[in-house]
Image (cartoon, rainbow, N blue to C red):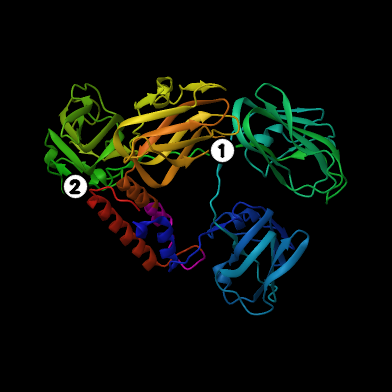
Amino acid sequence: MDKFSVTNMEAFLEGGSSAVEKVNIALGKNVVIEGVETASGFPASNLTDGTTGSAWMPSEAKWPVTMTIDLEEEKNLNGIAFAPNQAAGGFPITYKVEVRNGATWSTVAETIDGTITGTISIDYKGTADAVRFTFNSTDSTLVPEMRELMVYENAGEKVEYDNVALNKPVDVKNVGTDRPASNITDGDDNTFWSATSEGIGAEITVDLEKNEMVDLVEVVFEKAKLPFQFEVRAIEADGTETTILDKKSESNALERRYQIPVEREIKGIKYILTGKSGAGDFPGAWAALAEIKALREKEVVVEAINVALDKPVTGSDAESGKPLSNITDGKEDTLWISNGGVMPANAQIDLINSYFVENIELIFEKEGLPFQFHVDVIDSNDVVHTVLDMRENDTVIDHKYTIPVGKNIKAIDVKITGNNGQGTSYLAWPAIAEVKAYSKPENVALNATVNPDTGAALVDGNETNGITIRSGDVKEYIIDFGKIVDINTIETIGKAYGGLKYTVEYRSMEDENEWISFLDKSANTNASEKLLTALKNPITTNAVKVKFINESFTINEFKAYKADATGKLLTYIGELEKTYNSTIVGELSGQYPQEAKDALLLSINNAKAASQKMELILWK
C-alpha cells in the first residue's frame, strides 16, 4: 500500500522519491512597495495571492523597485522565488534578494546584468523574519510588472486551531474608539481597533459568552516594534481574573504577536494597556490592537468515506450513454436512465466487502420528480433490510435523500417501482444520478459491557451524556467487547482541566489475566473535548482497561474503532484524487509536466483496482 500514499505521489510528481514538501509562507502576507506608486487595479496583494494569473503593476515606468515581505516571526526558509511577467523574457532586469534576521539584512542572491525569463528560484536555506526583493533595469521605458513572490518553508506537522473568540463581543473602557472594537475578533490580522488617544489605562475585554476550553490566547498588534506595555488576563470560569502575560515593565519594542498557553476552560480575555516604554520605531503610537484570539486545537475526527465509489452496479437495462456505472462514478451530473423508461427498474451496488455504513445518500437528477421507490441493504448474512420505503409516495420527491443505516452491509439495492403522476415532470423515466454509502470504521465499544456498570454511559453512543468523576470516585473501567476484534484507533470525548489524561491496556489473548499497555495519554495537555489517537499497529483483543488520571473530569464517551484496511486505502485514493485535481500542468513554479500528471492518474486507477480486490484485512 506504500506506493499509493499521498506522500509518495507528491514525490512522484516532483520526479523522484526524495522530494521535500514545502509550503509557501508568503501567501496572504503584506508586501510593502518602495520606489514607485502602485497602479489602480493591480495591488500589491496580488503578489502573495498564490496565483500567477494576477499581477502587481506600477503607475509609471520607474526603477528601481523594492518589495518587502514581513514574515512576522523568524522562519526556517527552504527556498525563495519570484515570477515576473512572462513577456519580460529577454528584457534587461536585474535583481537582488535579501533576508533579514533581527535588524541585519543579508544578500542571498544578486545579478548585475543580463535578463530574466520565467520563474526565478533561489536556493536559500536559513532563517529570516523578512525578505526583500529589489528589481532594476537599464531600460527606462520598461514598466515593472511582477506576478508572484514566494517564500518557502519545509512543511512540518502543524497543529491547527479553531478560534473560539471569532466574532465574539468586545468591550472597550477608559478610552475613545476610532476604528471599531469588532475588528479585534473579526479573524483578520490586517484590520485593527484604534483609539482616539494614547490610551494608557485602556481595558479591552473579549466575552466568549460561555466557558470554552482554550489551549492558547493569541494577541496580535497592528505591527511590530510598537512601544506598549501591557497585561493579558484570563477571565476564569468562576469570574475571577488571572494574569497570563505580564508586560507591564517591558523595556523593548514589541513583537507583532504573542501566543500565551492557557490549557483550561475560560469565559473571557482582558487586555490592559498600562504604559509605554518609548522603545521601537513608533514611540508616539496611539493605542491599537489587531486581534485577540482564543485558540483551541482542532478536533481530529474519524472521517466517513464513500465506499460505493466506483463499485460495480447491476440491474435494469440502461439507455445508450447512460449506463448503470454512472451511479457510482462520484459525479452528480451523470445519470443512469432505464432503457425505454421501463418500470419497475432497479440498480444494485456490490460493495465487494462488508462495511459498517452509517448512512446512504441517494441523489436523483433533480427535485420534483414523480417516482415511488424503496432502498434496501443486504447484510453479510444475506438478510435484506429496507432502509427507506417510498412505495406509497403520493407527491414529488426531493433531489437528495440521506438515509440512516447503521449496519454492516455488502450491497445496496434501489428500486423505482412506480410513477404517481405528480409535478411538471410526470412523464420522467426512471433515473438515478448517484448512490453514496458513507462508512466509518465500526466502533466496537458501542454498547459493550462495562465493569463497574457505573461506567455504562461511556459506551452508550450518546456523546452529550456522560459521567462526572471527582476525587475518590472509581477511575478504572474494563470494557468487554464480547468478541475478539482488531482495533487501530481510540477516541475519547470528555473534559478536564489541562486536558483529559488516561492510559489504556488491552487483555492478552494468551493469558486473560494479563493486561498490556498500548496507549499512554498521561501527559496529554490538549484541552480539546475529542481526543483521537490512531495506533501505529493494531491490537487484537476482546477487552480494554481504561485508567483515568485527572483528579476530577467529565467523560462522555469511549470509542474503539475496528481496523479496516480497505477503508484506509479508499481514503488514500480520495486524497490522491484531490491532489490530481489540483495539479496544474505547466512550467512555472508549483506546476508539473503532463506526463507526471498522467502517471499519477495511472497510479490512482491502480489503487482503485487494488481496493476492489481486497477481501482480507491487510495492514500497511
Number of numbered labels in the structure image: 2
Q: Is residue 62 above or below residue 447?
A: below
Does residue 172 show up? yes
Name the disc covering residue 326, or none: none
Q: Which residues are magenta?
A: 576-589
Measured from the top left, where is residue 554 in percent x and y?
52, 25
Residue visible at 18% across and 24% down in the picture = 391
Left or right: 189 as drawn, with respect to 202 = left
Q: Which residue is mark 1?
A: 526
Q: Residue 220: x, y in percent?
A: 70, 42
- In the image, what residue type sits under mark 1? Asn
Q: Secondary structure under badge 1? A: loop
Camera-side residue of 552 and 313: 552
89 left or right, relative to 389: right
The image quarter containing residue 139 is bottom right
> Pointer 2 and pointer 1: residues touching (CB < 8 Å)?
no
Residue 577 within the magenta-colored segment of the rendering? yes
Look at the picture and state if 145 lies above or below 71. Answer: below
Task: Report, in whole angstroms, how far the alpha carbon at label 2 lies from the one at label 1.
Answer: 50 Å
With 349 as the anchor, is 214 left or right in this view? right
Evaluate whether residue 460 shows in this view. Answer: no
- Reading the chain from its start, which is encountered first: label 2 or label 1? 2
Q: Residue furthest bottom?
A: 114
Q: Quadrant of residue 261?
A: top right
Q: Residues within 10 Å of mark 1 (few under 14, many from 20)?
A: many
Amino acid type, callout 2: Pro
Mark 2 highlights which residue?
323
Which residue shows up at 12% across the image and 33% down it? Answer: 344
Q: Position of residue 228 (x, y in %)?
A: 82, 42
**From what the image shows, is residue 226 above or below residue 181?**
below
x 47%, y 28%: residue: 476
284 drawn magenta: no
